[in-house]
Amino acid sequence: MRKSVGVAAASAAVLLVAGCGGGGPQSGGDSKLSGDKIVLGVLNDQSGAYSELSGKNSVKAVEMAIADFKAKYGDKAITKDITVETADHQNKPDVANSKAQEMYDRKGVDAILDVPTSSAALKVADVAKEKKKLYFNIGAATTDLTGKSCNKYTFHYAYDTYMLAHGTGTVTTEQVGKNWYILYPNYAFGQDMEKSFSAAITAAGGQVIGKDGAPFPNTSGDYSSFLLKAAAMNPKPQVLGTMQAGAELVNVVKQYNEFKLRDKGIGLAVGLMFISDIHSLTPAALAGTTYTDAWYWNFDQQNRDWADKFQKETGTRPSFAHAANYSAAMQYLEAVQAAGTDDADAVVKKLEGKEVNDLFLRNGKIRAEDHRVIHDAYLAQVKPQAEVSEPWDYVKILKTIPAAEAFRAPSADCKM
Amino acid sequence: MSGFLQNTFNGLVSGAFYALLALGLAVIFGMLRVVNFAHGAFYMLGAFGAYVLLAEAGVPFWAALVIMPLALGLLGMVLERAVIHRLTRLDPLYNFLLTFGLTLILQDLVKSRYGTQSSPYHTPDELSGSVDFGLFDFPTYRVFILAFTVLLCVAVWWVLGRTRVGMVVRAATERPELTRAFGIDVGKWVTPVFGFGIALAGLAGVLAAPMRAVNPLMGADLIIVVFAVVVIGGLGSIFGSVAAGFGIGLIQAWGEAYLSDFPIVSQTVVFVVMAVVLLWRPAGLFGREEAPA
């Protein structure tokens, strides 16, 4: 990384030149902010499958971060003019690509946040690299963001497939059973998840005795042939690992319960689950299921206080993606404040290697090598209905996975 | 062997949904020459209605199974009178676009009120166990769906085959011009038949709520397969739609169970069947070539 200081200086020079020719409203000397203000861009799914777990409420979370930042610094804040731009990428890579360019070029956005859906997330990473503007990915799972697609301006904030597989795969193999049957949606995300899980299970001394890629999207909504196959296998799997997400996960779990696989000695492990999925299925349908969570609203008083504020704004409890958007916006603003400018290279320098404890990041560190933001993760288990004491209080945390263990070591594929 | 029987049963259960939806589409197409693209949206409203009734008024599954089809059937009749009726004289494409627009409106209305996440709905307690068939167990709820749908199809077949109303509908479906030529007022049956088709979609929706994810897009995913079913059975053929519904359910279940190593095949088998049927019999398996006008 040391040699990148030179690169940083060089690109800062390039930026300055480009800035002069750009014709934008340049500040009059004393201010170090482009356009005399800070603009955050939230680019995510606002109408489709992922709009519930992030969507418009992530915009609210970012607005909450701005308000808290202004309250914290008062008159000492680098600026009071901080705004939010939002756009709906509809989970389509091409839309994400053009919206990201529009945000950076025409809307004066200094940093883009969120961007769920791995394929869309990778496109935006390319745009950030080309435009030399900051990008904090929160919503996507692919480890390529800190692998072969990593770059100086992209930070991967909340979670990734390694974190999910490592937490759930390892602990479930040790505590529930060694023989797994894996069911995954047959496209990029599902295939990635299957590979990550298989690796984690094998490393923990378990084995994958069967796996199937279900059609994606599964138009019939029926998974019974896979569930019956798992139940009839010899030796019998002790764990059914499902990598389906959103509505498809709901279908799998409903049918898992219909066929009473739990009574037949086959436990359930879920690759990626959000609190909103548990709400849809109700805890009764998922009781005992283990999964890896990046953050839980009812974990401690700090989380709870923030979740109360969030509920006042939105009427619902926050998912980990909402908390991560808040945290990323806050850390960006803090870095701009510390750098005294919104110049991307200067801000990156403030972020790299920073150790952070905030609402979302516990024992957090913004890794300089690959821009993976590491933090404690949690192994969660869904409570039986009888133990649910209030709405949305659906899980108990079995174990905190320390930051250093929760994420993979920097990948050799990442060349900044 | 028991595995094969289980997969066959599952195929029939999926097929039951296709059959109910395709049957509704077939009678509507037969009577009105309208390809009702909004059918999936009514299926979704059936499931969502069951959820809303339960969550907001404590109305149980059994009552919803009666209330939702009646309510949606009524809504269907109102829509037929208010808008669809006005376009039937024009190119069928106009009604296709109209019902497509209706689909988007209905989906977005539900989305704006309840969001895109799935809503919770449980199997009623009486049906949550499983039935022992000797060779294998099968969830009671699935047995119920299958028995209920078969009874319903038999009842519809009886009404169509043995009553005067049924005779008119059949005649108007299969030979509309000729029926009019006999002086039968086809027009007065159009609205009730449309309502009936919609009611079937709503019923399928209520039945789906305990076993499928209940969300605004649940109908949009399913309707594509149902259109393939209708085309395979023969557009407007009542028997064809039911037979093709169950047949496609079976083919999908067997495909997923025995061809899972070839996902490309198991995912496309429905459309391959459709293409083959269309090449071999362009009017579908049970459809008749339209008489030249």
Image (tube, rainbow, N blue to C red):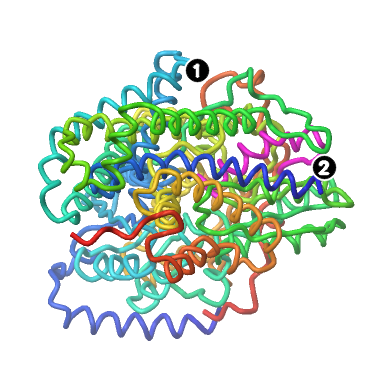
Instruction: Name the side, left or right, on which B133 lies relative to B9.
Output: right
Is residue A309 something one can see in this rendering? no
Instruction: Name the side, left or right, on which A393 lies relative to A134.
Output: right
Q: Position of residue A325 (x, y in %)?
A: 42, 49
Q: Quadrant of residue A337?
A: bottom left
Q: Residues within 10 Å of mark 2 (few under 14, many from 20)?
A: some
Q: Amino acid at mark 2?
A: Val
Instruction: Say whether mark 1 and mark 2 are on the same chain.
Output: no
Q: Which residue is mark 2?
A: A176
A236 to A41, vertically: above or below: above
Q: Position of residue A392 (x, y in %)?
A: 52, 28
Is residue B115 something one can see in this rendering? yes
Q: Nearer the viewer, residue A369 or A177?
A: A177
Q: Nearer the viewer, residue A82 or B205?
A: B205
Q: Which residue is mark 1?
A: B62
Q: Position of residue B10 (x, y in %)?
A: 64, 43
Q: Chain of mark 1?
A: B
Q: Which mark is residue A248?
A: none
Element carrying mark 2:
loop
Q: Which residues are magenta?
A: A245-268
Q: Residue at x 18, y 64 (%)?
A: A35
Q: Nearer the viewer, mark 2 or mark 1?
A: 1
Q: CA distance from mark 2 to mark 1?
A: 38 Å
Any magenta on residue B62? no
Q: Quadrant of residue A70?
A: top left
Q: Amino acid at mark 1?
A: Trp
